[in-house]
Amino acid sequence: MFITKMSLSRRQLLRGLGATIALPLLDAMVPALSAFATAKPVRRLGLVYTPNGVIMQNFTPATTGRSFELTPILKPLEPVRDHVLVLSGLANNVRGSHAISSASWLTGVAPKKSVTDLDGRPTVDQIAAEHLGQHTQLASLELGLELPDFAGECDGGYSCAYTNTVSWRDATTPLPMETDPRVAFERIFGDGDSTSTRVRSVELERDRSILDGVTRDAATLQKALGPGDRRKLAQFLDAIRDIERRIQMAEQQSAEVPLPQFERPAGVPDRFDDHAKLMFDLQVMAFQCDLTRVITFMMGKEVSNRSYPEIGVPEPHHATSHHQNDPDNIAKVTKIDTLHMEMFA
């Protein structure tokens, strides 16, 4: 950053460009040597999960150092290779079924083998969210591309809860992956039709009025309750206060930094790549607008049998991933892995 005496406002720059979109924070918008200019950079954590393993010989670079050659699967990262680190030699020593893969990915600990008695662990994303979430409207986002349509026993005596998500708040609380872009949009930006400041202001004022009414009713009800119900109501009011905090932060952020213009999605696109791009766009916007600093994203579930005919792989992903060293199957799984990396890139 060049140190100058210029401080350029976003509003001034937008007027000069004749544009109607909000911009990310630029160095020129920060007064030189101000507290903001010298503050520590914001830390964010985005975790992206792909299922059924990858073809490691087509993923791992052959050499180390800055000049490593990008492998076929990593080739889509060429435009941003200066920002990429490939860490080799890491291993999660948990062994077993596919269910263990997703359940232990962010914990390093195998879950209990049971269908009804859940015993996961708090995941890394939720540990980070406890700290980073204090500064944002949403502590974390959990998103995915495949519906959590598995129930009961999924794989080798393990609950489907271990397959449907990679994020756990605690040992018995799996966090659902939201797969519908419309619902994800509403969670991030509210249930208006767009991110416009006017629509957001109306939504926030309405939510505030509802919360005020709920709080008054709860205060009246509390006087007539026994000790046990009072504790439950106190927990409920804590949740209400957290929502109020988020509304206050939303109002402050809307006043300081207008959101980029983005229409609410109609629903889930038919094509995989359209769905993936839309969900990634929502993640980028949530980070850019500092609405959350922790996002976990499942591009697919373990034992996923999604097919990818648009790239010449009409066979189910999971079945093909058990390739038995067949060159044709290895080539097909490499195509799937590369497609996932293209979406990530």
Image (tube, grey):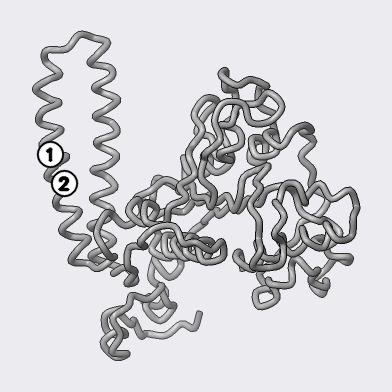
**Disc 2 residue type?**
Arg
Question: What residue appears at the point 60 percent right and 21 percent down from the top-left corner?
Answer: 115
Asked which secondary structure carries label 2, the reply is: helix
In front here: 276 or 109? 276
- Quick check: 151 left or right of 28? right
Q: Secondary structure at mark 1?
A: helix
Q: Position of residue 191 (x, y in %)?
A: 26, 54
Give percent across and percent down for residue 187: 35, 50
Q: Residue furthest top?
A: 226
Residue at 36% over, 62% down: 265
Q: Where does label 1 land, which residue?
A: 212
Mark 2 crowd level (few <14, some 14–19, many ≥20, 10 Å Cα)? some
Q: Residue at x 42, y 64 (%)?
A: 285
Please tell me whether residue 265 is drawn above or below residue 243 in the rendered image. Answer: below
Q: Position of residue 324 (x, y in %)?
A: 89, 48
Cβ–Cβ below 8 Å for labels 2 and 1?
Answer: yes
Q: Position of residue 292 (x, y in %)?
A: 42, 53
51 versus 168 height, above or below: below
Looking at the image, residue 308 lies above or below residue 167: below
Query: Which circle marks residue 208 in the picture?
Result: 2
